[in-house]
Image (cartoon, helix red, strand yellow):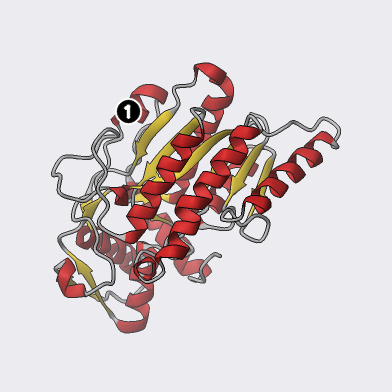
Amino acid sequence: MGALIVFGAAGQLGSALVRAARSADIDVAALAHGDADIAREDDVARALDAVARARAGRAGGRLCTVAVNAAAWTDVDRAETAAAAAHAVNARGAGIVAVQCAARGIALLHISTDYIFDGESRAAYVEDDPPRPVNVYGASKLAGETAVRDAGPRHVILRCSTLFGARGRNFLTAVVRRARQHGSVRVPVDQRSSPTPLEAAAGAALRLVGEIERRGESMPFGTYHFGGEPAASRYEFAQAIVDAAGELGLPPPRLEAAAREALRSAAKRPAFSVLDGGKIRRTFGIASPDWRAALKPTVAALLAGGDSPEA
């Protein structure tokens, strides 16, 4: 595989992707927010041109033919009162990256979310199901998908669900942090999704990058879903997290089930956002991971390394 550009390289998925790429001896240009603010067209253009110059000036250097946009505003609740900021990154920024990549012949893998759906379904969402976001974050990510599609055909949109890892702000780290600090965790029993290990999502993204490079113009570009199995409610996921933490020595917290409305969060969440991974499996042989297998090692890494968030 050749060289790769990653926007959002300091975020949870971006950093996992950079680690996976470097472990596979792939030349990766890791662009954090300080290297390229994707909401600023000049920033993105300068960053892409700088990467091209660096590769061209290096003996044996390969030009980057694929970029991954993992940069995103992910604070779902704060987006409700900072809609302009969320849209600047998730919608306008996604479009800027897509347009600038298309102008340079760079194919784009764009990361999206299950929160573009309204949660009214009771069957796992497939790629062609109509999106109806119920919060600002979901609306901004849906607008970003539209901007990516409008920029040109050479893109893959990868929708992921409930990403979790040992660092940063995600459901797993929040449950463990609250268990440590308060001894009790209150979670919704009526919100169901597809918990997905960050490393598995990074691996799937890297596989797609390889497919883009290998297949070229015959690549089946478009939208794909990737999520862990089996589907789980937030309560079931939290129970599995605290069970794993208890086995590793964390005093067991009290787990309290609650309805989503009782938690009084700023943003409404879809009650059901399970993703069907059939299309990505049939097309590329990328299977949905069993999140339970990754849970204990992830909790162990969190307890061993602390829970300071990534940027």
Q: In which quarter of the image is residue 39?
A: bottom right
Q: In which quadrant will I find the N terminus?
A: top right
Residue 218 percent coordinates (x, y): 50, 16
Residue position for label 1 = 279
Q: Is residue 283 above or below residue 232?
A: above
Q: Which of 215 and 184 is in front in this view?
A: 215
Query: Is any atom of residue 66 visible in this view?
Result: no
Residue type for callout 1: Lys
Residue shown at 36%/58% (left/top)?
Answer: 137
Residue 234 to residue 102: above or below: below
Q: 44 or 262: nearer the eye?
A: 44
- Give residue 97's quadrant in the image: top right
Image side of residue 72 versus residue 55, left or right? left
Residue 293 image position (x, y, % from top left): 35, 47
Residue 291 visible in the displayed image: yes
Judge from the rendering whether residue 89 lies leftward or rightward of residue 83; answer left or right. right
Q: How many labels does the image show?
A: 1
Which residue sits at x=16%, y=70%? 261
**Element at label 1:** helix
Q: Residue at x 65, y 54 (%)?
A: 36
* Residue 55, percent from left and from top: 78, 37
